[in-house]
Amino acid sequence: MLTFLERGSLHVAPQAVYIHIPFCTNKCHYCDFTAYVVKGQPVDDYLSALEREMERTVEQHPPREIRSVFIGGGTPTVLSPRQMERLCVAIRRYFPRWATDMEFTVEANPGTTEPEKLTAMRECGVNRISFGAQTFRDDLLRRIGRIHTAEDVFRSVEQARHAGFDNLSLDLIFGLPGQTLADMEETLRTAISLRPDHISTYSLKVEEGTLFYTLYQRGELPLPPEEEEVEMYQLTRRILGEVGLNQYEISNFAHPGKESRHNLTYWRHEEFYGLGAGAHGYVGGVRHANVRGIREYIEKTRRGFPTEEVHHVSRAEAMENFMIFGLRVLSGVEESEFERRFGLPLDRVFGSVLAALQQKGLLEIESGRVRLTEQGLLFGNEVFAAFLGEAENTSID
């Protein structure tokens, strides 16, 4: 059996690639991602920098067969058809071995996927689009700083299907300022009418450095009560489940076989290439974060890697992350997989934590699998926090 340290010494290359496009038509009021308004930005220079980072990355960590590519942002679909084609060609050049069933996702803002761009995406291998719909109330969209309308979502989905895309995902947000339970139900019903293959639903997080954070500090952000947010989440689970969009992760729902392969890479604590300004990667047991500034990123790639932070993941930390990320998935984690990866039985490392969480009714263990209970779904952060530091405090040699 290979232990974690022995496996790490083999330097098995990742099978997933994340690429960050940090440009948007505008900055949403809740967004704290690495994203900049595209007007006046050196987009082509940025794409050249991405190619330089790809080249250096694969020289240091030669790729094997790639099972998923995810182009996120920002809004990748602010790229022109020519720029999108250039990016996809570069990905294929530096990561040439693609699985026959590879998932290639591009995030898109409704209204930015005209037919010519969709055709360019299809021709270079993109087979999944994730639309940031967020809500179908135009006044709420304006309130959160989105510039698309509900009609833009309908049109973009129709155009994508006409272009041949048969794997579409919608992102929705609940807990928006002024949003009610009835609003959320209407949003869910409307989303379902578009026949998406996958839906992600996230509760609004007020992050420092955003306009919403400033308004919240002033008492000018009318958020729904916490109890109503919980009701919105439970309503989402019920309505999507009724139409066969099965919940497979805390915030994600899909028809069978349409689960996000790329995001499962993260939740299974598997390694992945991360490229672009502000991107994070995890390769060879090392996590890294790139610089966030566009021009700084471009300049750094001319001299070497655009890395800002590097963190060597210890065996104990990897064990904790395996549990924290893995328990986000409703099927949970397998005790046998933990032992296969780390060479130790799960209960030897986390036995006391598992027992305490079971006693609280937040975890259940059945047939060698550990998963969240219904109660655990609502108190996931408490469950995840319980694992932090526990492997470090356990004798694992």
Image: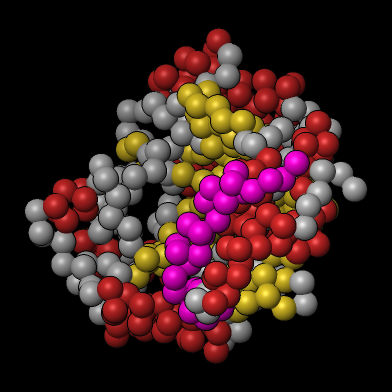
Question: Residue sitting at 64 percent across and 37 percent down?
Answer: 314
Q: Tell me where residue 13 appears, x and y as whole percent.
A: 77, 36
Q: Nearer the viewer, residue 348 or 367?
A: 348
Query: Which corner quadrant holds the C terminus?
Result: top right
Toward which corner of the image does residue 229 lie, by quadrant?
bottom left
Left or right: residue 148 versus residue 320 is left
Q: Tell me where residue 152 appears, x and y as whole percent.
A: 38, 64
Q: Nearer the viewer, residue 117 or 55?
A: 55
Left or right: residue 261 versus residue 356 is right
* Residues shaded magenta: 372-397
Residue 163 falls inside the magenta stretch: no
Left or right: residue 360 versus residue 30 is right
Toward which corner of the image does residue 303 lie, by quadrant?
top right
Q: Tell me where residue 329 appears, x and y as whole percent.
A: 61, 66
Rendered position, 56 above or below 360: above
* Residue 76 appears in view: yes
Left or right: residue 26 versus residue 21 is left
Residue 380 falls inside the magenta stretch: yes
